[in-house]
Each structure stands twice: as C-alpha cells, then as structure tokens.
Amino acid sequence: MVIVGKIMDIINATDLVTQVVIRVKKDDIYLPVSFVCYQDIKALILQLRFEKGDYVKITYYLKSKKYKDIYYTSAVVEKISITQKATKQYSVDMFTGEIIE
C-alpha cells in the first residue's frame, strides 16, 4: 500500500525502531497515521535527514501479532522517500525590520 503525507513527528522508540507520524487528509479532516520503521529504513531516515514538515511517500504493509488473546496491528514501512522538503519560514518584525527565525 502507498500513502503520501506530511511528517508531523519522528519518534526514536529504541535503537532499532523509529516511528514516523504523518498527517493525511481524508475527506475534509486531517488524521495522524503512525508507521513503524526498522533498521534499514531508520538508517535511511537519518542519512537523508528527514524532518518535521517534509512531505513523504511511504510504501508499507500491515503486520499483526497476537499477545494475550488481543491482536495488535502495525503499519511497517517498506520504502520511504521525500516528495517535498520542508521550507523554513521567517518572520519580520514590522517595527525594527529584524528577521525572526
């Protein structure tokens, strides 16, 4: 499955696992969707310097595990790529003309 969205957060859960949370629009509302990234994808995220605000395209699959008679499902990233890099926006103080980051 493939999904495109804007990165809201990147969470380093452990040394081997990272979660990428993206914002996806469905109908008229925006929803956060969390994806699990393992070693090779985590290394790619660090290497390409993914950051909040980047637009990404994610290819993923669903994986379920049963634990104490309850099923837990994860969306696991197979491929991830940046479709648009976040741009830094600056503000200007209208009285002094100073640029504020």
Image: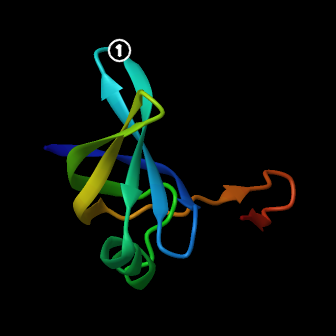
The percent coordinates of residue 44 (x first, y second) are 34, 78
Foreground: 77 or 30? Answer: 77
- Left or right placement of residue 87 versus residue 55 in this view: right
Foreground: 2 or 26? Answer: 2
Q: Is residue 85 above or below residue 39?
A: above
Residue 67 falls in which quadrant of the image? top left
Q: How is the image coloured?
A: rainbow
The percent coordinates of residue 2 (x first, y second) are 15, 46
- Left or right placement of residue 83 versus residue 34 in this view: left
Residue type at mark 1 is: Asp
The percent coordinates of residue 36 (x first, y second) are 39, 55
Q: Callout 1: few (<14), some (14-19), or many (20+) C-alpha neighbours within 10 Å?
A: few
Residue 37 falls in which quadrant of the image? bottom left
Q: Secondary structure at mark 1?
A: loop
Residue that appears at 31% across and 45% down: 75
Q: Is residue 8 above or below residue 92?
A: above
Residue that appears at 43% across and 27% down: 70
Mark count: 1
Furthest-left residue in view? 1
Foreground: 89 or 61? Answer: 61
The percent coordinates of residue 59 (x first, y second) are 18, 54
Foreground: 30 or 10? Answer: 10
Residue that appears at 45% across and 54% down: 20
Residue that appears at 28% across and 15% down: 27
Quadrant occupied by the N terminus: top left
Furthest-top residue in view? 28
Furthest-right residue in view? 96
Quadrant occupied by the C terminus: bottom right
Furthest-front residue in view? 68
* Residue highlighted by disc 1: 28
